[in-house]
């Protein structure tokens, strides 16, 4: 990577206040990049199944090949090294490690991650391992999935298989990525795997995801108290569209189901009383058993924060009603009128600052790392496959500056991982949405760093030089 490009967002506010030792990384997930879906003992995940349901994934795309990372891993590690990041956040495929969701470790499956960790360390890159990024073994979904309590115990067993094999070299362990998506998109809205539409099941999934996190963290910490344990949540600010009671109540409900239902039990060992009351009004009771909240609140060392956008919330539908067709209170997203990415997400970097400072205020003493932040654009490669993606670069610059502003305001943020290392399978959007710093030609699997990759590398250089 020898290119030097015009600087975007290189003003003093971009990095001001970021501490010495601030981590810089890139992130991926197993199903989105690995491919090799049926090789070396891997069995189907819920995403393998979901991708086969007509109409659920754009263009009928699937992760059978994806970025072929399973076969190109050493090349990809060199690509990561060329970005001069110090950390690589990746996830482990549960059905590759433990085919069928039970039994002993699959030697070929764990062998891939063993080699990946060694390659990273040889390149001076710290592995940041995520145990669950949505690829639940299909057999466990058939047995009830995350709404079933047993899945939490199966997750803890799987976590220990990975931990026992790799904790001698991996110091940073994230249990779950975005449990809100797993529960709400997967079990309530049906927009992601496994595609169910059952609000009560989704709320049970919330509790069992958190229980699985706590069980796994307890066992891993007992085995190695010096490791760093984390959970990653996707969050944004939920502000009322107006000062009306309906809008304020809708914003409270949304914040309760998106932020506080996770962080309150994790940090304080209790579910928010108003959320419990809201659920009761919908005839839903969280399946809490004695001792569960003590397990869920097992201390963590780091909170992973994923941020992409912010919107306002209204409790009034466009037709003026305040309840939906099922009789539940309305909660409706209201746009701020900002520019949007290819995902139709509004770009609101100041919402990022507000979120981080809010988390620091409401959950003090919990260091944060930005485990995902990025944007999709309609990338247009030139004849050499090079993408001049100034939109993405500007997005990164604005959001890194937003993190810096939060740090100056007192938020304890210790790292930033760009989403994503390379273009990949963007879940239900298939291969149509590109988030990568690196362009991938999915026909040839040729990787070409985009302009944003060079900018990110140069930004990391500037950040380190500021502390020399």
Image (cartoon, grey):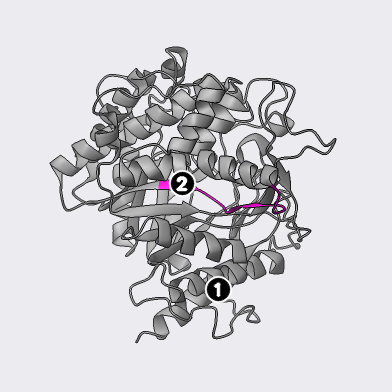
Total marks in image: 2
Give how far apart the Cα atoms at labels 2 and 1 are. 21 Å
Query: Secondary structure beneath disc 1?
Result: helix
Start and end of the magenta stretch?
232-244
- What residue appears at the point 72 percent right and 29 percent down from the top-left corner? 323
Q: In this orientation, which residue lies closer to the viewer: 393 or 384? A: 393
Image coordinates of residue 138 in percent, x first then y, are 46, 19
Residue under the point 73% across and 57% down:
379
Q: Is 425 left, or right, of 124 in this rendering? A: right
Q: Is residue 380 above or below residue 13?
A: above
Asked whether 323 falls inside the magenta stretch, the response is no
- The disc placed on residue 233 is 2
Mark 2 lies on a secondary structure that is strand
Q: Residue furthest top?
A: 143
Work out whether residue 23 or residue 207 is closer to the camera in this orientation and state it. 207
Look at the image and tell me in which quarter the C terminus lies. Answer: bottom left
Q: Identify the residue under disc 1.
A: 401
Quarter occupied by residue 191: top right
* Residue 338 against residue 201 in the figure, above or below: below
Residue at the image position 33 percent from the left and 49 percent from the top: 230
Q: Assess disc 2: are there few (<14), some (14-19) or many (≥20) residues with their C-alpha within 10 Å of its C-alpha.
A: many
Classify 10 Å Cα crowding around label 1: few (below 14), some (14-19), many (20 and above). Answer: many
């Amino acid at each position: 990577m020898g290119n030097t490009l015009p600087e975007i967002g290189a003003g003093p506010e971009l990095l001001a206040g970021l501490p010495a030792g601030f981590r810089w990384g890139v992130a991926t997930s197993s199903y989105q990049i690995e491919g090799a879906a049926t090789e070396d003992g891997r069995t189907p995940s819920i995403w393998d199944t979901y991708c086969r349901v007509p109409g659920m994934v754009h263009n009928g795309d699937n992760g059978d090949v994806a970025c072929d990372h399973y076969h190109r891993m050493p090349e990809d590690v060199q690509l990561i090294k060329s970005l001069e990041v110090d950390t690589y956040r990746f996830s482990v495929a549960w059905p590759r490690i433990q085919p069928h969701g039970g039994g002993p470790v699959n030697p070929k499956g764990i062998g891939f991650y063993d080699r990946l960790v060694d390659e990273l360390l040889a390149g001076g890159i710290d592995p940041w391992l995520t145990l669950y990024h949505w690829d639940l073994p299909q057999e466990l979904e058939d047995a009830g999935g995350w709404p079933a309590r047993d899945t939490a115990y199966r997750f803890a067993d799987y976590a220990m298989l990975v931990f026992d094999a790799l904790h001698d070299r991996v110091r940073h362990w994230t249990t779950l990525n975005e449990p809100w998506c797993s529960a709400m998109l997967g079990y309530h809205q049906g927009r992601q795997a496994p595609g169910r539409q059952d609000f009560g099941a989704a709320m049970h999934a919330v509790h069992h995801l958190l229980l699985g996190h706590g069980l796994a963290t307890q066992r891993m910490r007992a085995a190695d108290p010096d490791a760093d344990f984390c959970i990653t949540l996707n969050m944004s600010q939920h502000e009322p569209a107006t000062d009306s009671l309906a809008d304020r109540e809708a914003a409270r409900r949304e914040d309760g189901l998106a932020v506080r239902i996770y962080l309150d039990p994790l940090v304080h060992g209790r579910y928010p009383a108003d959320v419990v009351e809201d659920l009761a009004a919908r005839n839903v009771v969280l399946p809490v058993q004695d001792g569960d909240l003590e397990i869920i609140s097992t201390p963590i060392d780091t909170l992973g924060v994923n941020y992409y956008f912010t919107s306002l919330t209204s409790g009034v539908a466009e037709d003026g009603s305040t309840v939906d067709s099922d009789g539940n209170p309305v909660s409706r997203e209201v746009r701020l009128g900002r520019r949007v990415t290819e995902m139709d997400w509004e770009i609101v970097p100041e919402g990022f600052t507000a979120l981080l400072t809010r988390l620091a205020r409401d959950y003090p003493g919990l260091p944060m790392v930005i485990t995902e932040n990025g944007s999709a654009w309609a990338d247009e490669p030139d004849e050499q496959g090079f993408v001049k993606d100034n939109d993405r670069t500007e997005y990164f610059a604005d959001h890194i500056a937003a993190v810096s502003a939060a740090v100056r305001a007192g938020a304890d943020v210790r790292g930033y991982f760009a989403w994503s290392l390379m273009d990949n399978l963007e879940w239900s959007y298939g291969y149509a949405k590109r988030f990568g710093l690196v362009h991938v030609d999915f026909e040839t699997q040729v990787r070409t760093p985009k302009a944003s990759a060079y900018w990110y590398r140069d930004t990391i250089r500037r950040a380190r030089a500021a502390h020399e």
